[in-house]
Amino acid sequence: MAGTIVTITDREKFQHILDTYFARTSVYLRTKSGDLNIQYLGFSEGNAAFRIPRVKNCPDMLLILTRHGDSTIYATLKYVENNEDTFIFMPVKFQIISGERREARTSLPIEGNDKNVIFLSNLMTDFLMQNCLMANEKKLDNIKESLKYDLEQKFERVRIVFMHESKTDPRLKHIQMDYVPIFIPDIGEKPDEKNEQAFNYYINEIYSKDFKLNSDKTFISEATVPILYRSIIPYGYIQVNNRRPMTEGYLTVTKRMAIVVSEYFRKEAIFPNVKDRFLVSDLSARGLGVVFRDRRLTRYFRQGGLVSCDLMLPTNKKVMIGAVVRNMLFNDNGIIKVGFELKNIDALSQVNYEEYLESLGVSTD
């Protein structure tokens, strides 16, 4: 269920909110690279003081946050002045969002020889994949040329697009959100009730923004299939169009070609896995967190980014997961924590993961 949002702009309430929610607890400054752990010092004459380590200057407006129960409290602050690591701000508004986290995380040991110490390995992220794609343009051109030759025997229009080639492509946006192929057998035929929503989305969000298809009304059918890394991260798609209706068989052919692309990328090692391992600090049925001290490792993560990795359990079983980076916290003790929300997991991995959670007494509901 979506959380409720309460916005507070009454300055008479500002000190009460700060003293109630931000004192003697973990407070974080939101930055482009992650959330930095800071400390609330007090409120005086309409301004709030915070200790912010390792920061020499800050923007005119910034956002901080803290958590209380199942609520997250955000504060928008205007910079006034600073003296070394003590910064003075004028609060502008507060927002209290309730119900953001629906479950508790179970903490795990992060040192020693405890049997429950576990790691993430074989990491790959969409950010790293974009860099790899840009570094292998010549190889991509070769595979496009080869695939197009095969596909053009069956289809009148063929496009192969990788995620580094466009940031505004509506088809790419669709597959990165839903991982679901687009299949329009005949644009002139009214779909059944089951497919009506997908058809309307295609017409309004994709077809209407495709200049080439709109300028040539003779193309009446389409199949667009995502190209997936380990069936977890979509990094491109194959689009085919015809001037005649398509059957399910055409969709199957396109899916097979997407698998061919994935196999080619695997054999050519275009996406080499990160060799670093990441210590898991906590987990739940819907997410987990990792911790590390080396700031160089933050380059692998960005908020909202997709991640593929293996969770190696103490039972010698492997859990292959896809996740979304939800936060990155920079703590004052030098430990950096990255939080993930699980997005997809195959059936066997799901069984292994739930068995492990149950062994720790963690709810899998």
Image (cartoon, rainbow, N blue to C red):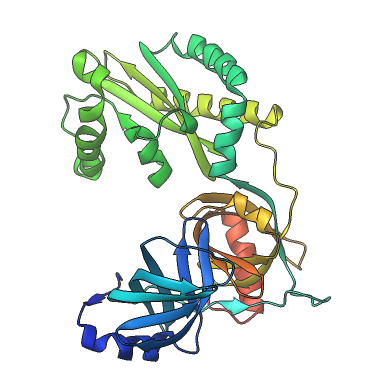
Going 46% across and 79% down the picture, which residue do you hit? 50
142 left or right, relative to 248:
right
Q: Position of residue 219 (x, y in %)?
A: 25, 16
- Asked where in the image residue 354 lies, by quadrant, the reply is bottom right
Determine whether 19 is above or below 32 in the image: below
Question: In front here: 125 or 251?
Answer: 125
Q: Position of residue 250 (x, y in %)?
A: 40, 22
Residue 217 in sight: no
Determine whether 144 is above or below 44 in the image: above
Determine whether 199 is above or below 307 in the image: above
Residue at the outermost right position:
113
Going 35% across and 32% down the picture, which residue do you hit? 169
Q: Position of residue 221 (x, y in %)?
A: 28, 22
Going 53% across and 68% down the picture, which residue do you hit? 36
140 left or right, relative to 193:
right
Q: Quadrant of the N terminus?
A: bottom left
Going 37% across and 39% down the picture, which residue do you hit? 173
67 left or right, relative to 114:
left
* Labels in figure, total: 0
Q: Where is residue 282 in the image (x, y as percent from the top left)?
A: 61, 73
Residue 32 in sight: yes
